[in-house]
Amino acid sequence: MSPPPADDAATIEESRERPETFAHLYDRYAADIHRYVARRLGDGVADDITAETFLAAFRHRARFDTSRHNARPWLYGIAAHLISRHRRTEVRGLRALARTGTDPVAESWADRADSRVTAQAAKAPLAAALAGLSPRDRHVLLLVAWADLTYQEVAEALDIPVGTVRSRLNRARRKVRTALGDDPMFVNDTAKVV
Amino acid sequence: MDEMTAVCELRADAPVPDRARLAPGRIRLVRATERTSRARTRLGRRWAAVAAAAAVAVVTVAALVVPQLVTGSGERSVRPAAPPVVRTDDLEDAATVLNRAADAVERLPDPKPRAGQWVYQKTMRGHESKPQSGPAEQEHWYPYVDPRFENGKEGDDHSFRERYELVDRLPADPERTLATARASYPPIKGESRSAHSFRASRVLADTYPVPPGGLARLYRAMATIDGLKVVDRLVEDARGRGAIAVYLPERDDAFQDQMLFDPQTFTCVGQRVVATKAYSFGKADPLHPDDTKAGDVLINSLVLESGLVDRKGQRP
């Protein structure tokens, strides 16, 4: 068995003739996608959404722009689309954290007695702010913060202009910053500079 | 701390899944890729079989897990008449087992699925040689009618409706039934006619909802496949219960697909993939299992519960 090609575009090109090579993309990125989904919706649905992400990617591989060598943003975009179907679940989890200080999403992978879960109480204002964002702004913010995508990569993932990424991110950050302004745990950078 | 740092720290302890956790999803993907490629390597062929067993294993039992079967309206179906108690040591050939399975399934009510309903399945894996780190039980919802998987759009991956209707139309003549099964699931290069019949029939039998009469005809046709054997002892199903294992021995085959039946009720209780000899998958593909030895149970799965429901997310 030959080693997988390092270039994602080459893998996808090759998968048009030899579909089984598409599994190499799974080997490269499934763990990242799984963790991202678990972080947004909980451990319980991460298996299915990760699998669905790659199945959808495989079925629509002809749409991948092979001038882009890295398929990671494209896969996150598909995952984001699937996550959107669970928007109410996500918001419900964030509101529960904001209201009770206990994070049902973190509970899905941590022991209930784990102190890390109860420590999430300090995150309540942040959770409330995230729950209050529009789905589109939340996607941009969390793809940058949790998936480590660049602005350009978020633009590719969500198929929007880079300028739109910037404006959505700025709006989301501003709302979160405002919400955290009331939180004694939070010290604004601007205040530190001054 | 700025706001981005605060966001980055939220749920930062989310675990990175290990490869065993990711393996079922990979198998689903490989199965999809295999369907679009008939030019397979030997290893690829075997993993297609493994994947097929993992993804749909079970299903035959679906129609047979009677206490859980309900109609879309929530009306609970009736139990079949109690099957006769039999001595497991009477079971020396596969044809006997399959014919008794046909007798048992014939008594079940037709689930009479309707367009717009969802197929609910609760599946499990267990009692495998290498422990799974992921959840042992999973729930799934599928649309009964799914045009994406009809009229050949996804090759031999048929919608639940197409499979129901296909089984319903199976003729009483075993040869014609096996020919229909083979036509529905094309041959793999190098596969014997018996192996093709057994594989295609298992996939077809492995569906829910299923018309009981059609499934009985399918079981009776499978009983005529040359070379089918029964493991000479009870094996463990995914719940650890004793089961009769029907299989087709094939020379030089590193893996054996087994269909499991309850020794008392003759209902299908899942499928297993068992290594018949030591096998190395090599190191190039890190998500494949480590090297296996003869007797290793690679996949052991069954459907715990099935039913037709009116909405995705609803349970019977």
Image (cartoon, coloured by chain):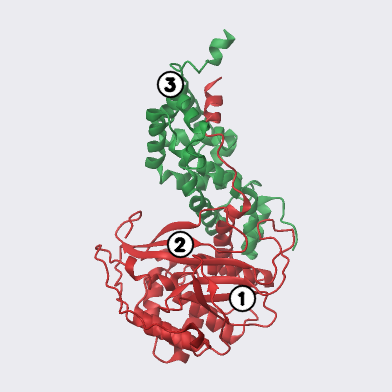
Chain colours: A green, B red
**Residue B116 on image: x %, y %:** 30, 62
**Residue B225 on image: x %, y %:** 53, 88
Q: Which residue is mark 1?
A: B256
* Residue at the spot 64% in from the left edge and 48% down from the top edge: A67
**Residue A192 on image: x %, y %:** 57, 11
For marks 3 and 2, give the one nearer the viewer. 2
Specify whether residue B146 is in view: no
Q: Which chain letter matches label 1? A: B
Q: Secondary structure at mark 3?
A: helix
Q: Amino acid at mark 2?
A: Thr
Q: Which of the marked residues, 1 or 2, is nearer the chain's N terminus?
A: 2
Q: Which residue is mark 2?
A: B123
Query: Circle 2: is it few (<14), some (14-19), or many (20+) Cα within 10 Å?
Result: many
Q: Which residue is mark 3?
A: A179
**Tag 1 and tag 2 share a subunit:** yes
Q: Secondary structure at mark 2?
A: strand
Q: Quarter-wise, where is residue B171 in the image?
A: bottom left
**Residue B287 on image: x %, y %:** 65, 57
Q: Amino acid at mark 1?
A: Gln
- Residue A19 lies left or right of residue B65; in this view the side is right
* Residue at the spot 56% in from the left edge and 43% down from the top edge: A35
Query: Circle 3: is it few (<14), some (14-19), or many (20+) Cα within 10 Å?
Result: some
